[in-house]
Image (cartoon, rainbow, N blue to C red):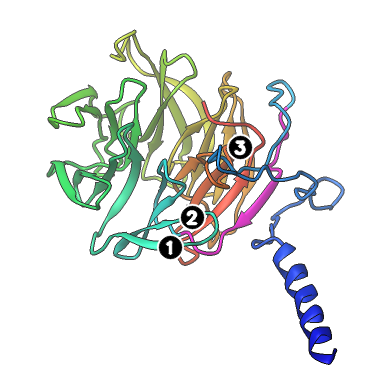
């Protein structure tokens, strides 16, 4: 009887421990009344044999009444990312951990994807499952086995976006005092087209990352000025049906922090999310160009490159995942409550 009682007692303890969240949300500002938003009131939709989705559920987005701050912010345990992260179709987040790319599931199962790879900046998955990365002045393609093939070399690259046409859109992101470029790469041949030449808005405006509007008629361009006191500027360029430029770029939003943007993502309501290094903040920009601070980080927890969650096996499609290079290459989950474009 004594042994059975002990087993029962231990079983109760294990049940209680296993029912706790594996990651405690942290909040760097809270709500106006000083409280922390309750994100545990939602029930998880657990995956079964008929579905590979396992994401918290949230109310449908009301684009006219979005919250002005995240629903929750959680620093994750196992995922790692230096300047960017990406999601594959098998339920992994991929990011750089020092000199390797690692894959991590939402349950923290970790494996090395590509060992001995340095200088990885932006990254994004092609529709066929190959990963495109900017690294050490090259753009490379990595297949599912981890084999790395350089597409183009001796070319500065930082921001990587896969366009709606399946091509690779690259922002050079380098600071050399003479601006940079936005170019399009054919994922197979590596053929390069320059879409935007140096000096996007005159001197000292380098394209750092790009993305597209909801209807794909506009390319948004997050920039790098190299001057800490300059206002951060997001530019835009109208695109035709072939995703070729249709006119000159124009200023879309200003005072998006200062001049050091590290990415740009777009939600289903057409809002932009831009992390900015000098102010250690994540900014939201409306489709009309109105700017607000969405998250104010400390320096060490500044969220760098960002991607929307895949919605597969626990990763939230209503959340942005940002790498934290100054906090041990950790990754933070920012629940926005609205999905990607």
* Label 3 environment density (alpha carbons within 10 Å; few <14, some 14–19, many ≥20): many
Could you tell whether 31 is left or right of 316 in the image? right
* Local secondary structure at mark 1: strand
Q: Quadrant of residue 271?
A: top right
The N terminus lies in quadrant: bottom right
N-term-proximal mark, 1 vs 3: 1
Q: Give the range drawn in magenta.
A: 66-79
Q: Mark 1 or 3, which is nearer the eye? A: 1
* Label 2 environment density (alpha carbons within 10 Å; few <14, some 14–19, many ≥20): many
N-term-proximal mark, 2 vs 3: 2
Magenta region, main secondary structure: loop
Distance in Å between CA atoms under marks 2 and 1 = 7 Å
Residue position marked by numbered label 2 in the rendering: 105
Residue position marked by numbered label 1 in the rendering: 110
Q: Can residue 279 be seen in this view?
A: yes
Residue drawn at point x = 47 percent, y = 41 percent: 307
Pointer 2 with pointer 1, Cβ within 8 A: yes
Q: Mark 2 or 3, which is nearer the eye? A: 2
Could you tell whether 24 is left or right of 1 in the image? left
Does residue 160 lie above or below 44 as drawn? above
Image coordinates of residue 204 in percent, x first then y, are 32, 36
On residue 318, the disc is 3
Q: How many marks?
A: 3
N-term-proximal mark, 2 vs 1: 2
């Amino acid at each position: 009887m004594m042994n059975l009682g002990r087993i029962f007692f231990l079983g109760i303890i294990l049940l209680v421990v296993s029912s706790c969240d594996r990651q405690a949300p942290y909040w760097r500002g809270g709500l106006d009344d000083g409280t922390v938003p309750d994100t545990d009131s939602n029930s998880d939709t657990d995956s079964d044999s008929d579905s590979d989705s396992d994401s918290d559920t949230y109310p449908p987005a009301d684009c006219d009444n979005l919250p002005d701050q995240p629903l929750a912010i959680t620093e994750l345990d196992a995922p790692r990312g230096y300047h960017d992260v990406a999601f594959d179709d098998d339920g992994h987040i991929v990011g750089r951990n020092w000199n390797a790319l690692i894959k991590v599931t939402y349950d923290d199962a970790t494996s090395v994807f590509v060992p001995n790879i340095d200088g990885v900046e932006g990254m994004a998955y092609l529709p066929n499952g190959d990963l495109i990365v900017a690294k050490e002045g090259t753009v490379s393609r990595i297949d599912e086995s981890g084999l790395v093939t350089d597409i183009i070399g001796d070319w500065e690259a930082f921001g990587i976006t896969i366009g709606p046409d399946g091509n690779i859109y690259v922002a050079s992101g380098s600071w050399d005092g003479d601006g940079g470029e936005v170019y399009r790469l054919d994922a197979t041949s590596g053929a390069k087209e320059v879409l935007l030449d140096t000096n996007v808005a005159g001197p000292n405006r380098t394209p750092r990352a790009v993305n597209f509007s909801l209807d794909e008629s506009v390319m948004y361009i997050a920039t790098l000025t190299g001057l800490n006191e300059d206002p951060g500027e997001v530019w835009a360029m109208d695109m035709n049906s072939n995703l070729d430029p249709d006119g000159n770029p124009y200023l879309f939003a200003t005072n998006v922090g200062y001049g050091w943007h590290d990415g740009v993502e777009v939600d289903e309501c057409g809002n932009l999310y831009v992390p900015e290094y000098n102010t250690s903040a994540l900014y939201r920009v409306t489709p009309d160009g109105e700017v607000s601070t969405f998250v104010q980080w400390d320096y060490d927890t500044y969220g760098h490159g960002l991607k929307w969650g895949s919605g597969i096996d626990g990763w939230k499609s209503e959340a942005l995942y940002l790498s934290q290079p100054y906090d041990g290459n950790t990754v933070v989950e920012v629940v926005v409550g609205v999905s990607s474009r």
